[in-house]
C-alpha cells in the first residue's frame, strides 16, 4: 500500500446502532465518515424495539443521543435511501459506487411538517374481507360513545392511534368487541389495530383500576431501590405487578424507563410523576388513595 496516496475517509454501510457507534468512533478519531443506509433514516432495527436485553432499558433512550450526534457531527455525512453497487481498489484507495433513490423532497429544506404525506396521492390502504367478521354486539350507550369518537376521524385513515386513545380514555381500557366494531366501521383489518394496541404500553386490553400506579424499573431506578418500592406497593395493594384489584380501584404496572433517571426511583400515580420515592412515601401514597375512595363512598 502506498501511504502517500491514502485517503483519510471511511465508508460505513448500515446505519443501525452498530453502524452509528462505528461512525462516531471513527469521526472522533479524525476520519471523514460516510454513513450509508438503505432505509429513509438511520436507526435500524433498534428503533422498533421497546426494551433492550438484558437490562430492559428503553431502546430509544440509548439510541437517541447517537442519532443526534451522527446528525450534528461535522465529520459524518449521512446518505440514506442508498445502496452500495460496487467496491473496487485497495486499502486507502477504494472506489465505491453508491446508488441513491430519489426522495422527491429536498431533504435540506424539509422541516418535518408532514404536508407531503398528507398530500401524497398514493395510499397504502390495507384490505380485508368484512364478510368474515360478524358485527359485534354493542349496547346503545356504547354505540353512541363510539360513534361520537369515530365521526371526526372517518375521513382520515391515519388517525387510528387518536381513536384508540379516545376509546381508552372513555372506557379506561380497550374492550375487544369495541375494537372489532372500530375495525369494521373504519374498514381496517383487526390485525393492524392489535399491532398498534400491543406495541404501545399506554394501551391495555384488560380492565384497569381507577388509580393507575406505575413503577419505573429501569437501571437507574433499579439501583436506587425500585424493587423494594414495588414489593411494598404489591403488599399494600395485595396484587402483583400487571394486576388490577378486585374492586377495580387500583392497577399496578411497571415500565422500563420514564426518561427522568435523575429523579429515580420514580412512581407515576394517575399521570403524576413522584420522584425520589421511598418505601415510606409509597405506603403513604396508597393510604391517601384509599382514604379518598372511602370518603367518596361515604358521600
Image (cartoon, rainbow, N blue to C red):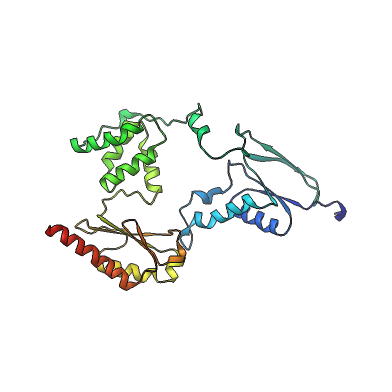
- 171 lies above or below 28: above
User: Is there any visible trace of residue 282 in the rendered image?
Assistant: yes
Front-most of 12 and 115? 115
The quarter of the image holding the C terminus is bottom left
Residue 173 horizontal/vertical position (percent):
29, 48
Residue found at x 27% / y 39%:
178
Relative horizontal placement of residue 4, taking residue 176 as reference (left or right):
right
Front-most of 20 and 291? 291
Residue 81 horizontal/vertical position (percent):
62, 39
The quarter of the image holding the N terminus is bottom right
Residue found at x 31% / y 73%:
280
Residue found at x 39% / y 39%:
192
Q: How many marks?
A: 0
Relative horizontal placement of residue 228, taking residue 109 as reference (left or right):
left
User: Is there any visible trace of residue 139 in the rendered image?
Assistant: no
Q: Quadrant of residue 235?
A: bottom left
Residue 241 horizontal/vertical position (percent):
32, 61
Residue 109 horizontal/vertical position (percent):
61, 37
- 183 lies above or below 1: above
Q: Residue furthest front?
A: 299
Amino acid at each position: 500500500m502506498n501511504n502517500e496516496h491514502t485517503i483519510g475517509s471511511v465508508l460505513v454501510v448500515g446505519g443501525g446502532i452498530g453502524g452509528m457507534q462505528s461512525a462516531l468512533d471513527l469521526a472522533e478519531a479524525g476520519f471523514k465518515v460516510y454513513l450509508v443506509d438503505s432505509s429513509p433514516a438511520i436507526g435500524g432495527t433498534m428503533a422498533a424495539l421497546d426494551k433492550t436485553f438484558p437490562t430492559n432499558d428503553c431502546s430509544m433512550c440509548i439510541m437517541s443521543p447517537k442519532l443526534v450526534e451522527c446528525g450534528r457531527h461535522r465529520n459524518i455525512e449521512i446518505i440514506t435511501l442508498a445502496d452500495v453497487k460496487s467496491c473496487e481498489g485497495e486499502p486507502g484507495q477504494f472506489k465505491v459506487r453508491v446508488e441513491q433513490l430519489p426522495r422527491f423532497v429536498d431533504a435540506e429544506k424539509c422541516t418535518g411538517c408532514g404536508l407531503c404525506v398528507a398530500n401524497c396521492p398514493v395510499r397504502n390502504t390495507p384490505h380485508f374481507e368484512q364478510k368474515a367478521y360478524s358485527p359485534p354486539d354493542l349496547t346503545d350507550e356504547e354505540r353512541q360513545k363510539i360513534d361520537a369518537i369515530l365521526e371526526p376521524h372517518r375521513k382520515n385513515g391515519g388517525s387510528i392511534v387518536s381513536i384508540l386513545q379516545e376509546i381508552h380514555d372513555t372506557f379506561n381500557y380497550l374492550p375487544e368487541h369495541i375494537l372489532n366494531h372500530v375495525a369494521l366501521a373504519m374498514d381496517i383489518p383487526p390485525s393492524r389495530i392489535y399491532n398498534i394496541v400491543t406495541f404501545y404500553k399506554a394501551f391495555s386490553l384488560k380492565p384497569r383500576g381507577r388509580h393507575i400506579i406505575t413503577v419505573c424499573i429501569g437501571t437507574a431506578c433499579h439501583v436506587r431501590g425500585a424493587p423494594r418500592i414495588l414489593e411494598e406497593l404489591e403488599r399494600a395493594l395485595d396484587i402483583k405487578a400487571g394486576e388490577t384489584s378486585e374492586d377495580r380501584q387500583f392497577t399496578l404496572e411497571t415500565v422500563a424507563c420514564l426518561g427522568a433517571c435523575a429523579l429515580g426511583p420514580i412512581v407515576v400515580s394517575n399521570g403524576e410523576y413522584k420522584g425520589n420515592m421511598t418505601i415510606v412515601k409509597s405506603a403513604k401514597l396508597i393510604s391517601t388513595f384509599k382514604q379518598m375512595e372511602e370518603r367518596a363512598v361515604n358521600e
